[in-house]
Image (spheres, grey):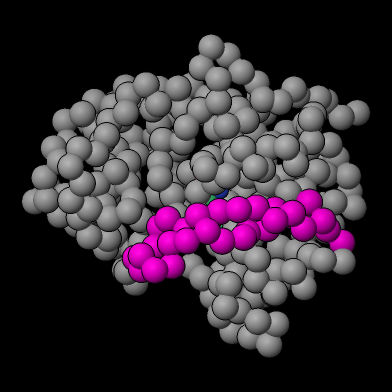
Amino acid sequence: MVRRAKRPVQDDHGPLRPFLKWAGGKRRLVAQIAPHLPRQFGRFHEPFVGSGALYFHLRPTRASLSDTNERLVRTYSGLRDEPDRVIELLSSYPHEKQFFLKMRAQDIDERSDAEVAAWFIYLNKTAYNGLYRVNRKNGYNVPFGDYRRPNICDEPTLRHCAKQLKRVKLQLSDFESAARRARKGDLVYFDPPYVPLSATSYFTSYTTQGFGLEDHRRLRDLALALKRRGVHVRLSNSGSPVVRDLYRDDFKLIPIKARRDINCRAASRGEIIELFIK
Ligand SMILES: C[S@@+](CC[C@H](N)C(=O)[O-])C[C@H]1O[C@@H](n2cnc3c(N)ncnc32)[C@H](O)[C@@H]1O
């Protein structure tokens, strides 16, 4: 039997904003995406969670969130389990370049989840464009953003998100093992690193964040297997011909108008068409 959860589950707070900025985050696109979601579903799964924009918008009662970025997953755990400590730390961190550089250089992985969360959120609010990028030794290497007044400790949002996360199952995992557990009637939303727009069907060896064509094929095969099992599957990706070729036979492709905003080159910040796939 499929247990039903109404969507979105709202209390006084209504839909939530994510507590992180994220490259490829869906905060500005949820209004276009939401009409294409099922009215009812069982558990919500987001296996490429990033800032979890759709999750925080929907606020489902039962959810599984996962990602391969260990510091990100530990940030979710730290905020969920110790919001007071995270807020205490964040409110003590000044907005100064020297302090930023000290934080950036810290060996954070040996610390508690709450400390990782404060570190991650601080850098997310103060680094250039909120980017998360590391070198080969996993050292965070995004420059100081030099913003006028970044909201380093947005206490209401942090508290609301922490409360929402109490209901969630968090996992550090590749998308495939995370989503395989979805059952008939569940909703799975896949938002992977996108296929670059310039990629063509003849182009076989590119990667974005280590996510290459083989991973995109693996994702399509999994999405199709889940769909055939009666799972509600939704995906986002670029409008590249490679994506159209992968999905056109078995899925519906819905154009979504997006803006490129996390990009160094101002010339490529215009409107682009992405795909929402169901
Ligand atoms: C486009 S972002 C997701 C954005 C998210 N929907 C949001 O609203 O912020 C893609 C995410 O996939 C994660 N990722 C990359 N490769 C992965 C893999 N093999 N399995 C699971 N997550 C992966 C990245 O760490 C990143 O957080």
Magenta stretch contains residue 268: yes
Residue 264 appears in the rendering: yes
Residue 278 shown left or right of residue 255 in the figure: right
Magenta stretch contains residue 151: no
- Residue at the spot 13% in from the left edge and 37% down from the top edge: 94
Q: Which stretch is magenta? A: 250-278
Residue 181 appears in the rendering: no
**How far across and how far down the image is residue 162, in percent?**
45, 26
Q: In terms of depth relative to the viewer, which is nearer, 156 or 222? A: 156
Residue 229 shown left or right of residue 241 in the figure: right
**How far across and how far down the image is residue 182, in percent?**
76, 43
Q: In which quarter of the image is residue 201?
A: bottom right
Instruction: Establish if 142 lies above or below 87.
Output: below
**How far across and how far down the image is residue 196, in percent?**
56, 72
Instruction: Establish if 182 lies above or below 145.
Output: above
Q: In terms of depth relative to the viewer, which is nearer, 78 or 25? A: 25
- Residue at the spot 45% in from the left edge and 22% down from the top edge: 160
- Residue at the spot 26% in from the left edge and 36% down from the top edge: 152
Q: Which residue in the rendered view is the most extreme toward the left? A: 98
Q: Quadrant of the N terminus?
A: top right
